[in-house]
Amino acid sequence: MSIRTLIRGGLLVTAFDEVHADVLVEDGRVAALAAHGSGAAAAWTADRTIDATGKYVIPGGVDAHTHMELPFGGTSASDTFETGTRAAAWGGTTTIVDFAVQSVGHSLREGLDTWYAKADGNCAVDYAFHMILSDVNEGTLKEMDLLVGEGVTSFKLFMAYPGVFYSDDGQILRAMQRGASNGGLIMMHAENGIAIDVLVEQALARGETDPRHHGEVRKVLLEAEATHRAIQLARVAGAPLYVVHVSAEEAVAELAAARDKGLPVFGETCPQYLFLSTDNLAEPDFQGAKYVCSTPLRPREHQAALWRGLRTNDLQVVSTDHCPFCFRGQKELGRGDFSKIPNGLPGVENRMDLLHQAVLDGHISRRRWIEIACATPARMFGLYPQKGTIAPGSDADIVLYDPHAEQVISAETHHMNVDYSAYEGKRITGRVDTVLSRGELVIDQREFTGRAGHGVFVPRSTCQYL
């Protein structure tokens, strides 16, 4: 039975507007908006009224880069689709786009079906998939067309991780050419993995085994070089390009130069690069292992370039690259050899809050917060306006956000299935109060009321910026 919900008295913030407005929700969708106190709003009747006085009413976040249950480095990411999507909801994210993985020697179909099985019936919020291409050949290129047809419209390739996910330039070019013809967006992990492996081998031979050396061997110049090379290959193929987890000033410069030429090149960064640095990787007693991810954390001076890129739109999206591994028993696999530390950080629960703190700190505006965390990822990956905004006809994925509540981020209070927080002890202002997913209360005044299986697979159209 459909419940009509009225959200009354809040400040509605989208990527395009800020207005005191009431929101009427019916059949899981936004039915109408009206200025608070207007005759239209006063005439509405509802089964349930939610008082949003003093709060922001914002679209549910769209996290376009997560890795739930990802096998990596002899272990697997510690969040399941159930625990990870529940944590996402606690953090005000109502849609994730996770990465299905093709294994070398296997079809895209096998990999995608494996991920469908992992997620089906387990998610608290809605989800979609990208496809990781690990083995580009004639068969998998043809499969790309079929996947686009069923709403999996983006494909990730790796210039890093030789022997695991790595594709050479020829394979990358072929995949880009296919994307240019079928509308699929190529996503690129841009690091020169062949050169990095040489530097890893040399560092270990010198006895440099601590986590901080992970950041030192994965050099800024090798991210910039790979970003430049990916852009040129995309130009040759006539294809759009989306570079994931951009971490360094020099890589931002490559994206900016391409965009200045009018090329369809896009960039994403993540909260860890905006708020953490090599200082964390250098924490003593192997604590730095908690912060091992790739691309790696950079010296603090790179943060200014990333914030500037977000303001100038040379970077368009902030996603998490959520890929959690517990410190005990997982990160510890790399004691004595940093190259064996599983790569990844937890963060799906923290993104919206950290970016709100960035608003308060003067890095971005309120509307830009919603743009980079909700609207643009939805448009980039073919989900808009179903997701990413609050407008008549959109899914009623709505967050009531308390901009004045104070909190301290901690593993003791987070809901991600991981034994540490990358932001332990960080004091921030702003907190999710209530979350609706397709009109259903998932978080009700800081109490989880959702359920595994509420979240459904959402097929996507192609990139809406092309």
Image: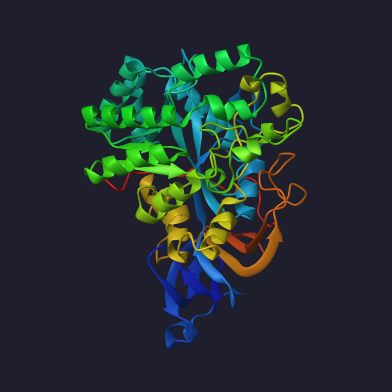
To which quarter of the image does residue 385 belong?
A: bottom left
Residue at the (49%, 24%) spot, across then down = 111
The residue nearer to you, when weighing 338 against 16, is: 338
Q: Position of residue 11 (x, y in %)?
A: 51, 74
Question: On the rendered structure, is 461 left or right of 65?
Answer: left
Examine the rendered structure and indicate whether residue 358 appears above or below residue 274.
Answer: below
Examine the rendered structure and indicate whether residue 446 appears above or below residue 417.
Answer: below
Quadrant where the N terminus lies?
Answer: bottom right
Quadrant where the C terminus lies?
Answer: top left
Look at the image and tell me whether residue 78 can be seen. Answer: no
The residue nearer to you, when weighing 117 against 257, is: 257
Q: Position of residue 154 (x, y in %)?
A: 38, 35
The way the protein has been coloured in the rendering is rainbow
Residue at the (68%, 34%) spot, across then down = 288
Q: Position of residue 263 (x, y in %)?
A: 24, 41
Look at the image and tell me whether residue 132 can be seen. Answer: yes
The residue nearer to you, when weighing 181 against 351, is: 351
Total numbered circles: 0
The residue nearer to you, when weighing 379 against 364, is: 364
Q: Position of residue 205 (x, y in %)?
A: 62, 11
Question: On the rendered structure, is 37 left or right of 212?
Answer: left
Question: On the rendered structure, is 285 left or right of 27?
Answer: right
